[in-house]
Image (tube, grey):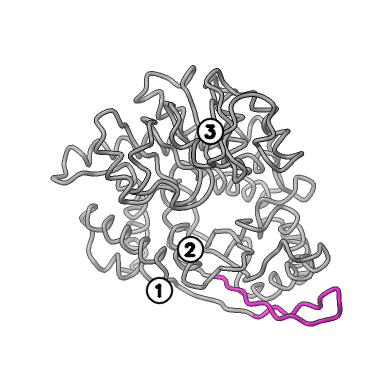
């Protein structure tokens, strides 16, 4: 069993207990509904036949069709895929979406494949999982190592099998193929909407607040961009090349341009250059947005974090041990957990899916307003529940605890009404 799956099961068990639900809820949700393991034979450019291994995990569909991304990565495992599918059940539940949780993966290194090989692999995977997916059954999307182009190949392959266009079976497609332009920046934008709501509730407003961002990929770049557009001062950003720091504030658009043109944010022409990519975690800031990978803030370095509010754009960037250290600080406010803060991606996928089902499309501004409204509502529900739990519980309760309790309760109520438990 992978450590990530163990961690997810532990969080699930705690949430069931904290919510006062029967133990059978944990028993039911600790295992997936279905696991599909497939082989994908691909003819390589040099004529060799390589057989790749892929998965699709369908965890729970009490609330609606399975929903979750597809990961192309050399180190994926079935155990991790099960944990990620479980996480999607809870994330979709907390977001109030009519979805259950699913996740897919192919064990490969997409960086080592040519465009033609990647297309053949993508189409092969779509064919292999086709019997178990559909716009009313299971709706995949991109994840690590996949992108809108791969979704375009997959939706085309699935539509060929059906004999007609089925746009709603995959989300985060290019705008030219029934996608929505908001999807490309929805995770970073949604994170900032959550950060703004938290700052307005606990830090007397977002405008003028000092923000630091760790990780400068898609989520980090758009979090920096929207934080600056909403009036905050972004003083630090980092990637694997190092950290750029300017206490007077960075020119975020220039930093994004430099990163995308040179591949390294440290080539930004102004500010201080710090060799340590983790330096952005420790600068003087009101709000820290970890947007890189899991296990970034740990028991070893949590004591060096100065920010009063952490808003997780990445999945699992703050370990349970680190959270205990952070919450023990008198001036610390909260970790707004990933399950809430980075849900902008799947919420936008839901909006795209609704467009696809009805063949009716909103413009970018209207779509963004719908996304923001859902994020703000979910933040308020979670913050309110957190305060209630803190008042009622005899033990320390984090905002993450409150988020998982709300998520588990909604799935439980749906299963109970259906007569499953």
- Neighbor class of circle 2 (other Cα within 10 Å; few <14, some 14-19, many 20+) is many
Q: Of discs 1 and 2, which sits in the foreground? A: 1
- Neighbor class of circle 1 (other Cα within 10 Å; few <14, some 14-19, many 20+) is few
Residue that mark 1 sits on: 1
Q: Secondary structure under badge 3?
A: helix
| Frontmost residue, 355 versus 261 | 261
| Residue drawn at (36%, 25%) of the image | 201
Asked whether the residues under the numbered discs 2 and 3 touch, taking CB atoms below 8 Å apart as contact, a structural biologist would say no
Asked if the magenta segment contains residue 55, the reply would be yes
Instruction: Please give left or right for residue 385 compared with residue 81 in the image.
Output: left
Residue that mark 3 sits on: 372
On-image quarter of the C terminus: bottom left
> In the picture shown, does residue 115 fall above or below 32?
above
* Residue 293 picture location, percent across and down: 51, 51
Q: Give the range drawn in magenta.
A: 39-56
> In the picture shown, does residue 167 fall above or below 54?
above
Counting residues from the N terminus, which is met first, the one under dot 2 or under dot 3? 2
| Residue drawn at (33%, 48%) of the image | 299
Q: Secondary structure under badge 2?
A: helix
Instruction: Please give left or right for residue 52 compared with residue 28 in the image.
Output: right
The image quarter containing residue 220 is top right
| Residue drawn at (46%, 71%) of the image | 79
On-image quarter of the N terminus: bottom left
| Frontmost residue, 65 versus 26 | 26
Counting residues from the N terminus, which is met first, the one under dot 1 or under dot 3? 1
* Residue 358 picture location, percent across and down: 67, 49
Residue that mark 2 sits on: 85
| Frontmost residue, 98 versus 419 | 98
């Amino acid at each position: 069993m992978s450590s990530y799956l163990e961690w997810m099961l532990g969080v699930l068990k705690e949430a069931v207990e904290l919510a006062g639900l029967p133990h059978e809820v944990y028993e039911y949700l600790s295992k997936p509904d279905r696991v599909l393991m497939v082989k994908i034979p691909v003819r390589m450019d040099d004529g060799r036949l390589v057989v790749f291994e892929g998965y699709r995990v369908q965890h729970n569909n009490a609330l609606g069709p399975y929903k979750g991304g597809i990961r192309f990565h050399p180190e994926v495992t079935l155990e991790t895929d099960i944990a990620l599918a479980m996480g999607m059940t809870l994330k979709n539940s907390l977001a109030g979406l009519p979805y259950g949780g699913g996740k897919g993966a192919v064990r490969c290194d997409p960086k080592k494949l040519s465009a033609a090989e990647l297309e053949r692999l993508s189409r092969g995977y779509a064919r292999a999982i086709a019997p178990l997916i559909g716009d009313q059954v299971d709706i995949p999307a991109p994840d690590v190592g996949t992108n809108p182009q791969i979704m375009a190949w997959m939706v085309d392959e699935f539509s060929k099998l059906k004999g007609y266009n089925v746009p709603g079976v995959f989300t985060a497609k290019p705008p030219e193929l029934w996608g929505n332009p908001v999807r490309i920046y929805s995770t970073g934008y949604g994170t900032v909407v959550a950060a703004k709501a938290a700052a307005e509730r606990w830090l007397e407003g977002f405008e003028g607040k000092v923000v630091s961002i760790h990780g400068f990929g898609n989520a980090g770049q758009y979090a920096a961009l929207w934080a600056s557009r909403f009036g905050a001062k972004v003083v630090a950003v980092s990637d694997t090349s190092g950290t750029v720091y300017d206490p007077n504030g960075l020119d975020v658009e220039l930093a994004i341009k430099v990163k995308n043109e040179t591949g390294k944010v440290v080539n930004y022409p102004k500010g201080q250059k710090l060799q340590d990519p983790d330096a952005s975690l420790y600068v003087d800031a009101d709000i820290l947005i970890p947007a890189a990978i899991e296990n970034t803030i740990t028991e070893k370095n949590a004591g060096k974090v100065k920010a009063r509010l952490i808003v997780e754009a990445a999945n699992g960037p703050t370990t349970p041990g680190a959270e205990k250290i952070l919450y023990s600080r008198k001036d610390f406010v909260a970790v707004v957990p990933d399950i809430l803060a980075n849900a902008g991606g799947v919420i936008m996928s839901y909006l795209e899916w609704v467009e696809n089902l009805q063949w009716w499309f909103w413009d970018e501004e209207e779509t963004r307003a719908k996304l923001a409204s859902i994020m703000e509502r979910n933040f308020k529900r979670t913050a309110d529940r957190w305060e209630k739990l803190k008042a009622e519980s005899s033990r320390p309760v984090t905002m993450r605890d409150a988020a998982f309790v709300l998520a588990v309760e909604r799935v439980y109520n749906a299963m109970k009404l259906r007569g499953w438990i």
